[in-house]
Image (cartoon, rainbow, N blue to C red):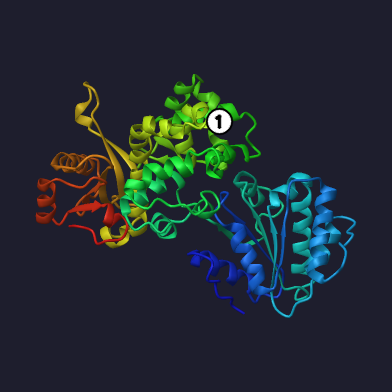
């Protein structure tokens, strides 16, 4: 039985297919899968729908003691079996044995959501679960068609479930990470037809589905002109749930012991300090002192470390969740004024900072996502998309000349072959782009050719949030190796070449 995706689930076709194929698989033994993803991405929504469509069992754990959670699990199983009272299990082994024995004529999804809460209450649970899965795969083959899925939002915890020497390592047949909606799908979900407005909204709420209705009471900006008013009434209004979301996302991570330090690290990144040394210097710490907080933020999925496309030993850090970047750059410095109801005045002061500190970097991220998702059709096979730094070796002895490339697209790497540079791109949100931007890309291409890269088919791409001047437009018309990507193109219109 293959379940059709319910009409009330937006997008998520790939995720739904993966879940239903796992849940209806024909293997004769128990199958085990793991679902994870940052909070508010709709994991619970998907899993509840899966259980309903396929007649499965769903249990959502909460914070509590081991005995209490075992009792709640027994109550939920009792409801599933029609028992008027909860099932009194002696321990988790007893409970799991009963769960795996639930009768069914076809494969049945058994879903335990927020599994990290259970692990916190009973650290031995993964080992018990492993033993029960192995038992049914080895000696009770065919006795159960259970399709067990565990799910959690604590990425640092879920990442350890299958890693290293973890008991469940090697048992999973499905490892599904539910990501935020891609930017085009997010615009559709928010019903934003204006690409400029869509990019601005995305810079605050990203592709997190929960924010669309629950957190802003289904309020969407009606136009670019309404954007400022929408920020004041839906994002900066202290009565809205979205107002404290940037703080809560950090507070919800169990591995974070010193919130003040982590807020300072995030603030440093939000203010444009993207390297290890600059982050440490901004908060007044030694570089070695921020190793642990940066690693924890990475494990939690709140920060991503990105490698420089052309300097293998260089990395930079970026905040992965837009609402956190917005909170750190815009809200946190003005928190006292915001909590006393001065949202309009704060936004009036912060609009310029929003354009430079939020929109500029976020637009570059959107452009890299565009190149990653759609680059095969524009540039040829894409292996890597990243920002990069191109240095001029001829400038040594003076101040070394560096050219920053916002969107570098490289081919897949093959041993013994020069790496092909599919595209070099520059992205500007608030400035009209001209020939000087194209010339800088040409210089970067020539320097990379000297360094041994294959630049024979490199496309020079200008990503312009404010458009292009006439000279650049004319150059693109006369040169097939120049690509202009404006906001309509970014959101789905054909590119200009």
Which of 190 and 267 lies nearest the eye of the viewer?
Answer: 190
Element carrying mark 1 = helix
Report how many numbered discs are placed on residues in the image: 1
Residue 320 visible to an observer of this rendering: no
Relative side of 301 to 347, left or right: right
Give the residue at x 34% y 44%: 363
**In which quadrant will I find the C terminus?**
bottom left
x and y percentages locating residue 454 in the rendered image: 24, 50
**In which quadrant will I find the N terminus?**
bottom right
x and y percentages locating residue 228 in the rendered image: 37, 42
Q: Around disc 1, counting alpha carbons within 10 Å, would you say few (fewer than 14), some (14 to 19), or many (20 or more)?
A: some
Which of 86 and 122 lies nearest the eye of the viewer?
Answer: 86
Residue 408 visible to an observer of this rendering: yes
Which of 102 and 45 lies nearest the eye of the viewer?
Answer: 45
Relative side of 420 to 92, left or right: left
x and y percentages locating residue 354 in the rendered image: 37, 36
* Occupied quadrant, residue 171: bottom right
x and y percentages locating residue 13 in the rendered image: 49, 67
Give the residue at x 28% y 50%: 418
Which of 203 and 292 lies nearest the eye of the viewer?
Answer: 203
Q: Tell me if residue 380 comes above or below residue 159 in the rendering.
A: below
Q: Circle 1 sits on which residue?
A: 262
Relative side of 398 to 312, left or right: left
């Amino acid at each position: 039985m293959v379940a059709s995706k319910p009409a009330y689930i937006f997008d998520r076709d790939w995720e739904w297919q993966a879940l239903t194929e796992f849940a209806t698989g024909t293997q004769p033994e128990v199958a085990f899968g793991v679902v994870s993803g940052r909070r508010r991405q709709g994991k619970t929504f998907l899993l509840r729908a899966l259980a309903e469509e396929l007649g499965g069992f769903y249990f959502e754990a909460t914070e509590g003691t081991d005995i209490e959670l075992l009792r709640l699990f027994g109550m939920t199983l009792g409801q599933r079996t029609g028992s008027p009272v909860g099932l009194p299990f002696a321990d988790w082994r007893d409970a799991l044995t009963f769960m795996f024995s639930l009768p069914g004529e076809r494969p049945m999804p058994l879903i335990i959501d927020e599994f990290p809460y259970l692990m916190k209450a009973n650290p031995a649970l993964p080992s018990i679960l492993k033993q029960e899965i192995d038992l049914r795969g080895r000696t009770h083959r065919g006795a159960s068609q259970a399709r067990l899925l565990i799910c959690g939002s604590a990425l640092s915890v879920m990442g350890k479930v299958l890693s290293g020497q973890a008991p469940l390592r090697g048992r999973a047949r499905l490892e599904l990470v539910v990501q935020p909606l891609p930017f085009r799908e997010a615009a559709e979900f928010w019903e934003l037809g204006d690409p400029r407005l869509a990019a601005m909204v995305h810079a605050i709420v990203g592709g997190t589905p929960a924010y669309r209705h629950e957190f802003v009471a289904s309020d969407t900006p009606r136009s670019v002109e309404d954007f400022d008013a929408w920020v004041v009434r839906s994002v900066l209004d202290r009565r809205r749930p979205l107002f404290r979301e940037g703080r809560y996302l950090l507070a919800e991570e169990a591995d974070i012991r010193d919130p003040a330090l982590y807020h300072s690290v995030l603030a440093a990144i939000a203010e444009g300090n993207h390297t290890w040394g600059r982050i440490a210097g901004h908060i007044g710490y030694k570089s070695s002192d921020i190793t642990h907080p940066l690693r924890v933020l990475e494990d939690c999925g709140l920060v991503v470390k990105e490698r420089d496309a052309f300097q293998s030993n260089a990395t930079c850090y970026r905040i992965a969740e837009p609402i956190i970047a917005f909170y750190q750059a815009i809200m946190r410095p003005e928190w006292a004024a915001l909590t006393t109801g001065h949202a309009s005045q704060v936004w009036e002061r912060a609009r310029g900072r929003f354009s430079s500190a939020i929109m500029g970097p976020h637009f570059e991220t959107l452009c890299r996502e565009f190149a990653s998702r759609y680059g095969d059709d524009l540039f040829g096979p894409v292996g890597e998309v990243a920002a990069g730094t191109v240095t001029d070796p001829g400038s040594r002895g003076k101040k070394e000349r560096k050219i920053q490339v916002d969107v570098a697209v490289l081919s897949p790497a093959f041993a013994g072959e020069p790496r092909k540079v599919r595209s070099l791109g520059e992205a500007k949100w608030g400035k009209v782009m001209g020939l000087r931007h194209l010339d800088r890309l040409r210089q970067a291409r020539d320097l990379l050719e000297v360094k041994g890269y294959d630049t024979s088919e490199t496309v020079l791409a200008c990503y312009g949030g404010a458009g292009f001047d006439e000279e650049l437009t004319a150059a693109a018309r006369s040169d097939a190796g120049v690509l202009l990507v404006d906001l309509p193109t970014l959101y789905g219109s054909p590119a200009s070449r």
